[in-house]
Image (spheres, rainbow, N blue to C red):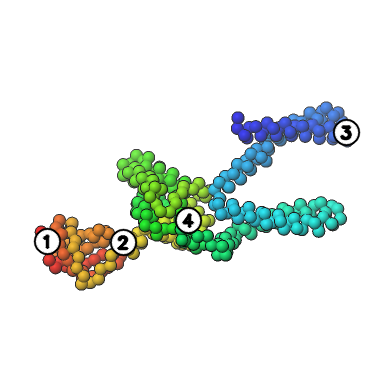
Amino acid sequence: MSAEFISRIIGMILFSIGGAVLGVRIAALTGDSPYKDAAIFLLVGALAGLVLTPYLTVRPIKSLRKRIRQAPAQQLVAAILGLIVGLIVAALLSFPLSLLPPPFSQILPFAAALLFGYLGIMIMITRQQDIFYAIRGQFPIRTEGHDLGSNSYRPVLLDTSVIIDGRIADVSRTGFIEGELLVPRFVLNEIQHIADSSDVLRRNRGRRGLEMLYRLQSESLTPVRITDMDIEGVRDVDDKLVLLAKQLRCPIITNDYNLNRVAELQGVRVLNINELANAVKALYLPGESLSVKIVQAGKEIGQGVGYLDDGTMVVVEDGEPYINREVEVTVTKVLQTAAGRMLFSRITRHGD
């Protein structure tokens, strides 16, 4: 039997007893038959208990448990500390308030406990970041030579595209990311949904995402955690991710252009893997020489196109006759585009 059903039965019994007692007292005041009034109020109480009890007991408890499960740990700690501070202030005020004449001496201490407990929780939750950063600044926590009081240790959220892409696994092994990597449950569910797709390409992408996630958990230098935190009333995964990042005040790692722009418009910091890849590519200046294998013809007549190991496109003037051959070229121009860096060059000498 479910907890809701049991609560309905208990509530029906208690409300029935209360209704019967109320009916007897009303009959004593009006002079009516106590049995008739007791039976009527007993039935009314039983119906009220059957309908209202879950809304007064089980459902509020379930809602509270769900909110506690989804709330960040720092927010829960802040709420508990705020409640303790508020109750301490209320306890200090209860003695002078108890000296007031009745009924104020009985009502005001209880009202003060409710008021200051609520204020303590609200103040701590609202200013939790500032308060915890101030505490960390006064008492910095050091682990393996690092200061945990800095902002660099904030968690970072991973989106679906960056997990499927897989480069985040290599980045995490370098130690450049020091904050905890958080994968929301709704992102994991989306990857699983893609892996179960009937389309072969989507299914392979989803399976790659699951493999990359397993690799992250086993090889990353920073902890990777699946979190059940969710945003109620929002269905789109990208919207959930942005709102969760705003709630946690942490950045998002992605290579999705649209998510990048939407997050930036809402004031959420974004760490884009594509921008990182472009930033760490080797820098070539006009006049420098390099070797490249020409793999295809270019857009212009006679041009050949090759790629460096980091994916940089190299356009070779008069390179079409050397397709599928590695040649040495001299850089003549460097062009930065939205898709990345592009090099224009001419052949200096070629090898067989």
Q: State the residue at coordinates (66%, 40%).
A: 57
Tell which of 14 and 149 is nearer to you.
149
Q: Secondary structure at mark 4?
A: loop
Q: Earlier in the sequence, mark 2 or mark 4?
A: 4
- In the rendered view of the protein, which quadrant contains the C terminus? bottom left
Q: Which residue is mark 4?
A: 155
**Residue furthest top in the image:** 35
Horizontally, residue 91 falls left or right of residue 301, namely right
Q: Please tell me whether mark 1 or mark 2 is closer to you in this view.
A: 1
Q: Which residue is mark 1?
A: 351
Q: State the residue at coordinates (70%, 34%).
A: 11
**Residue furthest front in the image:** 144
Distance between the alpha carbons at the discs numbered 2 and 4: 28 Å
Task: Measuring from the top left, give residue 324's x and y in whole percent.
Answer: 15, 56
Q: Amino acid at mark 4?
A: Pro
Task: Measuring from the top left, give residue 176's x and y in whole percent.
Answer: 39, 59
Q: Earlier in the sequence, mark 1 or mark 2?
A: 2
Q: Is residue 256 visible?
A: no
Q: Callout 2: 10 Å neighbours few (<14), some, many (20+)?
A: few
Q: Which residue is mark 2?
A: 339
Q: Amino acid at mark 3?
A: Ala
Distance between the alpha carbons at the discs numbered 2 and 3: 87 Å
Q: Please tell me whether mark 2 or mark 4 is closer to you in this view.
A: 4
Are circles 3 and 1 on residues that touch, CB within 8 Å?
Answer: no
Q: Amino acid at mark 1?
A: Gly
Distance between the alpha carbons at the discs numbered 3 and 1: 113 Å
Q: Which mark is residue 313?
A: none
